[in-house]
Amino acid sequence: MGCLAMRSLSRLPFALLLGLSLVGFTAHAAKARAQAVPQEKDAKKKGKLKVAVPADDAVLRIEGKDTKASGKERTFDVPALDPAKKYEYKLTVEWRPNNYTILTRNKTVVFAGGEEVTADLTIEDPADKAVIRYVPTPDDITAKMIELAKITPNDIVFEPGCGDSRIVIAAVKAGAKKGVGIDLEAERITESKANIKAAKLDDKIEARLGDALDIKDFDQATVVFLYMGNEFNLLIRPTLWKQLKVGTRIVSHRFVMGDWKPDATKAIKGEDGEEYEIHLWTITDEVKKKAEKK
Ligand SMILES: C[S@@+](CC[C@H](N)C(=O)[O-])C[C@H]1O[C@@H](n2cnc3c(N)ncnc32)[C@H](O)[C@@H]1O
């Protein structure tokens, strides 16, 4: 168990020091939310903070500082605080469901002095964030994805997590009228811009630095390409359902969309001898209705 011990009340509503084995944690935590009725010092009460996390080795941060406990259930002592006041901690958990995905989830817990408070960070949250490692799609598999999408001159292609924009460039070369690639890494966007320039497609392709989970103009797209991860696809799925127009095609290299079954899946033997799978979905009225209900 970790100990969240009082350090100083002089400069902040309170500042906490994480003791025992959890050396080095200082949290500028818990803004007092309500004005306290004046209390005797000894009326303050010790509390407990119990946190459930999605994985044994998940990194848990309290007020931005790493804690050192491990396991799926973690308990911290909260120092003696005023039971008449409300305090809050911002909790962040970061974990790796596989070797190419980092997921992050935030939660704020509010409690009064002396309370035992439980925070369940195992529950999926639409605000979860994901970072996926860069692995490019081989050119021959890119060509098959373009084929599966059946690109036409009316298409506007979006690619969340575009890497060096090879798929967007191939789609525009295959006839799409416009392309937008979005990547979290500045280096990928620099490479994308150089590749787009080399292909003389600056007037048709935009390479945008940003988080794919924050895209607001998917309604422009008629085709979406993805090579991200099953976890990422589940996170972006509600946004795709809400924003994409009926008829928009989604083509994903390898990864699926949970219980949303693809219209087509193609198994491909790559030129490198590896086995690949690509999947196609189409946005329908039913999908849009489902999104409205959520
Ligand atoms: C597996 S690579 C795929 C690259 C490219 N789509 C391809 O198939 O060649 C994943 C890409 O997504 C980017 N990425 C990871 N997390 C992201 C996020 N949350 N928003 C936008 N891009 C992200 C990475 O920087 C990387 O370029």
Image (cartoon, grey):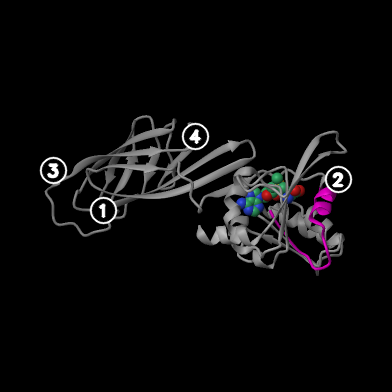
Image point 38% across, 39% down: which residue? 51
Residue that mark 3 sits on: 42
Mark 2 residue CB less than 8 A from any atom of ligand 1? no
Circle on res. 55 = 4
Q: Earlier in the sequence, mark 4 or mark 2?
A: 4
Spatial CA span between label 3 and label 2: 72 Å
Q: Earlier in the sequence, mark 1 or mark 2?
A: 1
Kind of element beneath mark 3: helix
Mark 1 or mark 2: which is in front? 2
257 is higher (above) or lower (below) than 239: above
Quarter of the figure with the N terminus: top left
Report the front residue among 236 and 98.
Answer: 236
Kind of element beneath mark 1: strand
Q: Residue 241 lies in what quarter of the image?
A: bottom right
What amino acid is at disc 2? Asp
Q: Which residues are magenta?
A: 142-160
- Residues marked 1 and 4 touching at CB (< 8 Å): no
Q: Earlier in the sequence, mark 3 or mark 2?
A: 3
Left or right for 258, reference 24: right
Spatial CA span between label 1 and label 2: 59 Å
Spatial CA span between label 1 and label 3: 18 Å
Residue that mark 1 sits on: 86
What amino acid is at disc 1? Lys
